[in-house]
């Protein structure tokens, strides 16, 4: 996380705002011994960047009741 003074933020406000929105990395601004955190509304998680894959066939309800003896790898994996 980047740390800035209020004077630096004032001088580069639009650049900092654009960078936070593009990268999702928050910026801390120090003022009179307190810290103000500037962050994007939604922080992208690592999971959100993964490609979605359909690996298991069936509904969640049908997979919930499968016992160990009933699992068939070729039938249930896509």
Image: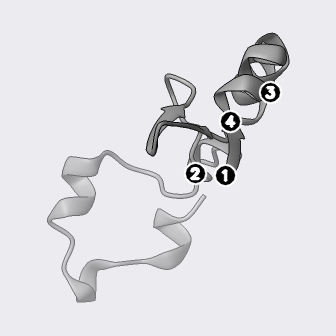
Can residue 50 be seen from the camera position used here?
no
Residue 59 in the image: x percent, y percent? Answer: 31, 45
Among the two numbered marks 2 and 3 on one chain, the one whose residue lies closer to the N terminus:
3
Near mark 3 (Cα within 10 A), the count class, few <14, some 14-19 or many ≥20, is: some
Up-down relation of residue 40 to residue 75 (above or below): above
Q: Quadrant of residue 30?
A: top right
| Mark 4 or mark 3, whichever is nearer to me | 4
Q: Secondary structure at mark 3?
A: helix
Q: Are marks 1 and 2 in contact (CB under 8 Å)?
A: no
Among the two numbered marks 4 and 2 on one chain, the one whose residue lies closer to the N terminus:
4
Q: Secondary structure at mark 1?
A: loop
Q: Are marks 2 and 3 in contact (CB under 8 Å)?
A: no
At 46% across and 64% down in the image, what residue appears?
Answer: 76
Disc 1/disc 2 C-alpha distance (Å):
20 Å
Q: Which residue is mark 4?
A: 5
Q: Which residue is mark 3?
A: 19
Q: Secondary structure at mark 2?
A: helix
Q: Is residue 24 left or right of residue 30?
A: right
Q: Quadrant of residue 20?
A: top right
Near mark 2 (Cα within 10 A), the count class, few <14, some 14-19 or many ≥20, is: few
Disc 4/disc 2 C-alpha distance (Å):
33 Å
Which residue, as the protein is rendered here, is positioned at the far front?
32
Can residue 44 be seen from the camera position used here?
yes
Q: Which residue is mark 1?
A: 1
Viewer-nearest residue: 38 or 63: 38
At 59% across and 42% down in the image, what residue appears?
Answer: 48
């Amino acid at each position: 996380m980047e740390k800035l003074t209020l004077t630096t933020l004032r001088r580069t406000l639009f650049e900092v705002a654009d960078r936070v929105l593009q990268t999702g990395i928050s910026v801390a601004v120090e003022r009179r011994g307190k810290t103000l955190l500037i962050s994007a509304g939604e922080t992208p998680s690592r999971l959100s960047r993964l490609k979605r894959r359909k690996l298991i066939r069936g509904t969640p309800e049908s997979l919930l009741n499968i016992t160990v003896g009933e699992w068939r790898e070729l039938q249930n994996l896509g």
